[in-house]
Amino acid sequence: MAQITLQNLAHSYLPNPKGEDDYALKQLDHDWTDGEAYALLGGSGCGKTTLLNIISGLIRPSRGRILFDGRDVTDAPTAQRNIAQVFQFPVVYDTLTVRDNLAFPLRNRGLPAAQVAQRVQAVARMLGLEEMLPRRARGLTADAKQKISLGRGMVRQDVNAILFDEPLTVIDPHMKWELRTQLKALHREFGHTMIYVTHDQTEALTFASRVVVMHEGRVVQIGTPQELFERPAHTFVGYFIGSPGMNLLPARVEGDRAHIDESGTIALGRGYGGLGGRIEIGVRPEFARLSAHEGLPVVIRRIEDVGRHRIVRADLGGRPINIVASEDEPIGPDMTRVVFDPAHVGVYADGWRVEGSPR
Ligand SMILES: Nc1ncnc2c1ncn2[C@@H]1O[C@H](COP(=O)(O)OP(=O)(O)OP(=O)(O)O)[C@@H](O)[C@H]1O
């Protein structure tokens, strides 16, 4: 396994890129810690595959360097990077048995038979493939075939990293949860550096210990699931992660107060000075609550029961706002106001979080 370093990296598919907009991947510097499980999360076209292909060597970046354990591999082809890859669709040999499919990457590297057998058995056990080992891959379901692909990706211990590109796309929805859990267990047991591309926040947050969030070719935040939830560094992280996402309201901030249009003024947990650009406050629905007496006036439009709690869809000064309410909290007609927890109200200037100072 290796620490993967991206230095001054950027990529454009154009031969002569001019401005920032010409770059599919904007300036990026990052160390991928050895042995960590990362998810690369973002919407369609944000540059996830471009970044993954740069790491794997399928694309040479137009700018910057990539290092494995300090060794420059920017010009090294994929074969020399010693990485395993799992793609969206299964890559298996139909005529071989499941056992031989799993053993293939190990035999290819000349591992002794006893070690191959032991490793294949361990991976098959973790993925629930043991009973299928003697069967030919032909005729197996897409789910089973993708499990074999995952197994082949994980079977070698000596790889620098394992890269997954939306590997659960073909998996039945009810199996996805099980496979995600198995992948996490495999990571815990084998400790590979893993980079897992997905546009699905549930997949990213359950699989990874650190999530790299991308938006319009830029990495906007790298953090633990908890950090992304509690302190989104960019408004995109706020509304992309969470269900529903973070509420965003245009505001005028003065010191430790935010004025929201005609709705009123709220207290902030920190003080802010000299803010420029487009200012918004962001507060997650979990940190907003309805009240009869205090807070800003809201009109409740709809209440949705989602099982564990209810989502109140309301209107604040003509803007939609979501509030999470517990199952047992009565929501009567007197609930005409919303209160935000000051400690969990973020301030954003041109989309980026501003760290205020303690009050
Ligand atoms: N070979 C290419 N030539 C030109 N432009 C490309 C090429 N591949 C990707 N792009 C562009 O680069 C940007 C990033 O694409 P990329 O495939 O990396 O995004 P992604 O996040 O993986 O999206 P998706 O989830 O849809 O696969 C997009 O605007 C895309 O149109």
Image: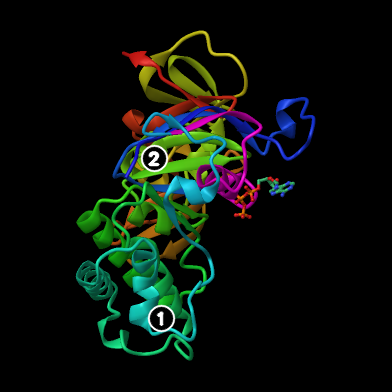
Looking at the image, which residue is at 37% across and 56% down?
Answer: 331
Q: Quadrant of residue 312?
A: bottom left
Question: Mark 1 is on which residue type?
Answer: Ala
Q: Residue at x 53, y 49 (%)?
A: 78
- Residue at x-position 77% and y-position 29%: 17
Q: Is residue 262 above or below residue 115?
A: above
Q: Nearer the viewer, residue 129 or 213?
A: 129
Q: Which picture quadrant has residue 175?
A: bottom left
Q: Quadrant of the N terminus?
A: top left
Q: With respect to residue 177, does 344 lie above or below?
A: above
**Is residue 51 part of the magenta span, yes or no?**
yes
Along the viewing direction, whichever of 340 and 91 lies nearer the viewer = 91
Q: Residue at x 20, y 71 (%)?
A: 114
**Residue labelled with disc 1:** 144
Q: Which residue is mark 2?
A: 228
Q: Are marks 2 and 1 in contact (CB under 8 Å)?
A: no
Mark 2 / mark 1, whichever is N-terminal: 1
> In the depicted view, which residue is nearer to us: 165 or 247?
165
Instruction: Nearest to the eye among marks 2 and 1: give it.
Output: 1
Q: Residue 49: image x %, image y %?
A: 58, 50
Describe the element under mark 2 as helix, strand or loop: helix
x and y percent of residue 155 in the render?
A: 32, 64
Q: What's the CA distance linking mark 2 and mark 1? A: 33 Å
Count residues near mark 2 (Cα–Cα under 10 Å), then give few for <14, some for 14-19, many for 20+.
Answer: many
Q: Could you tell me residue 142's position as x and y percent?
A: 48, 81
Q: Is residue 163 left or right of residue 57?
A: left
Bounds of the magenta segment: 42-67
Q: Is residue 333 magenta?
A: no
